Amino acid sequence: MESLFVALASASLLVTWVSSTHLVSLQGTCGGGEQYAAIATRNAATLQTASLAPFGRAEHGWGIYEAQVAATVGTKCASGSKRFAADLARWQSRNRLRVTGAVDAVTLGAMKLRWQNARPFIKSFASGSCPAAAEDQALATIGHREGWLGKPGKLDVRALDALRRMVSAARADDPRIKADAQMLTIVSAFRSPAYDAAKCAAGANCNGIAKARCSAHRTGTAVDLYVGAAPGHSPVDTDDDNRLFQSRTPAYRWLVKNAARFGFVNYVFEPWHWEWVGPEPQRVELETR
C-alpha cells in the first residue's frame, strides 16, 4: 500500500508543481525604496541558505514558510523584492521587533508564535491537559471521493461542511487544482486517542514535532489534506524536501490565501495539516514582549 501511496502521489506532479518563482514579482509595484536593496538581496539568499530552527529542528532557509510569511506580512510581492522587505519592516515595527526588513530567526520566531496561537488546540496545553476526543455523534462520515484514494474517515460535522465549501471554492478558482481529482482530498481526519497511542507504541519520537502523543486529530476538527507530494514521498512526509515542494503547489498557496475565510488555520510545519477553528478564526497579534 505504501508503494502505491508514493507512486500515485508522484504521478500528480505535473499538475501540482509550482516553481519558486510562482510568487508574483510585480516589477511596477514591488520595486520599493533603494534603502531596501541590500536587504532584498539578503532575503533572496537566506531563503535557501539561512540556518534556522523555527520548530525546533534545524533547517536550511525559510523557503518552506515563504508563503505564510508573505501572508502574515500582508504582501503580494516576491520575497526577494525591495517592497517585500519594506512591508516586512512595517510588520516588524507594528510587532515591536527590531526593524530591518530581513527574515531572521527572531522575526520567524515571532511569526511562529502568532501561527501557533491561532490554533485553539495549542492553547489547551496551557494547563497541561490534552483535549478530550470528539464524541461519535459529533462526527460525520466523509464521502468516498472525499478521501484520498477513497480512504474512509470521519470529521466534525461543522468542520466537514466548511471543508466541502472550501474545496469547492478552490477548484472553482484554480483549474490546476480542479485538474487533479485527488487534490485537497482527505488523507487523515479524526483519529482516536487509542489509535494514536498504538501508532506511538509502534514507532519512535512520539512527542516530537513529527509525531505527537496528543494529536489535534482527536478533536475531529483537524484534517490532513492532499496538497501534492515530492517524488518518492508520501503526502504526510515531514522530510524537508517534501515540505518545500508542497509549500509551492497551487493547492497550498491557495489555502494560505483563502483558508481563513472558511475557518481553517494551518500547522505551518506541516503544509498538509489544517484545523477548523470556527466560522471566524481568531486573529492573534503578537503581544509586547
Image: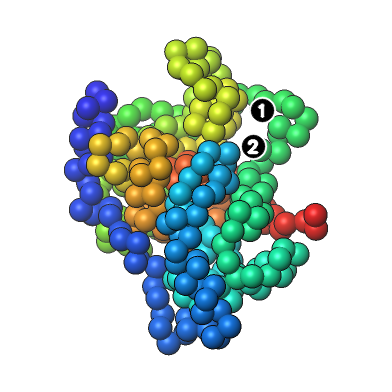
Crowding near the residue tagged with mark 1, few <14, some 14–19, many ≥20 C-alpha atoms within 10 Å: some
Q: Is residue 7 above or below residue 260?
A: above
The x and y percentages for residue 177 are: 30, 55
Q: Are marks 2 and 1 in contact (CB under 8 Å)?
A: yes
Q: Residue furthest right?
A: 288
Q: Quadrant of residue 251?
A: bottom left
> Which quarter of the rendering shows the N terminus?
top left
Q: 100 left or right of 256?
A: right
The x and y percentages for residue 180 are: 24, 49
- C-alpha separation, residue under disc 2 versus residue under disc 1: 7 Å
The x and y percentages for residue 96 are: 75, 64
Its colouring scheme is rainbow
Q: Which mark is residue 160?
A: none
Is any part of residue 186 visible from this angle?
no
Residue occupying the point 71% across, 38% down: 123
Q: Is residue 11 above or below residue 72?
A: above
Q: Amino acid at mark 2?
A: Phe
Residue occupying the point 21% across, 37% down: 8
Residue occupying the point 40% across, 52% down: 247
Q: Which residue is mark 1?
A: 131
Q: Earlier in the sequence, mark 2 or mark 1?
A: 2
> Which quarter of the rendering shows the C terminus?
bottom right
Choose between 29 and 228: the one closer to the eye: 29
Residue occupying the point 40% across, 42% down: 240
- Assign a secondary structure to mark 1: loop
Q: Which residue is mark 2?
A: 121
- Assign a secondary structure to mark 2: helix
Is any part of residue 8 visible from this angle?
yes
The x and y percentages for residue 197 are: 53, 15
